[in-house]
Image: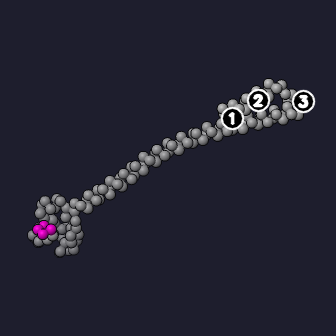
Amino acid sequence: MTISEKVAYLKGLAEGLNLDTEKSKEGKLISVMIGILEEIGLSIEDLEENSQALGEEIDVLSDDLADVESIVYDDEDEMDEDEEDYDDDWFEVECPTCEESLVIDDEALAEGFIQCPNCGTKYSLDLSDDTVEADDED
């Protein structure tokens, strides 16, 4: 039973007692108290409705935030995975001529040579003994 229903029941009981609300002091007091209780009941119902509406809006916002987090953090996870995969697929050496960093990846290994982007010198890749040696091929 809601507060408004309880107040309506109380109001019905007071009316059933046939209290004189105009001449009797007690009747006036009870009538005013019941009126105040009705207002309080209506205010509480409004607050409960607003609270429920706010709760629903918070749920929607929470779901939206979860979607944003999954997009942002999944992208970071994918980037981390890509970086990890990329770290496994390449390494850097220094150009003996100009000291520019040369990236040696699977494609360069398959070709067997690499060209320095800075000075243009080509180097062959010798992977014997698990080391990289740069031999000048000009």
Q: Residue at x 79, y 24 (%)?
A: 16
Quadrant where the C terminus is found in the figure: bottom left
Question: What residue is disc 3 on?
Answer: 23
Question: What residue is disc 1 on?
Answer: 3
The number of discs equals 3
**Looking at the image, residue 62 lies above or below residue 5:** below
The mark nearer the N terminus, 3 or 1, is 1
- The segment highlighted magenta reads 125-130
Q: Residues within 10 Å of mark 3 (few under 14, many from 20)?
A: few
| Residue 11 disc label | 2
Residue located farthest toward the left when viewing the structure as drawn? 137
Three-letter code for the amino acid on which mark 1 is drawn: Ile
Identify the image quadrant of residue 95: bottom left
| Residue 90 disc label | none
Residue 110 on image: x %, y %: 13, 59
In the rendered image, residue 127 lying in the magenta stretch gets the answer yes
The residue nearer to you, when weighing 125 against 70, is: 70
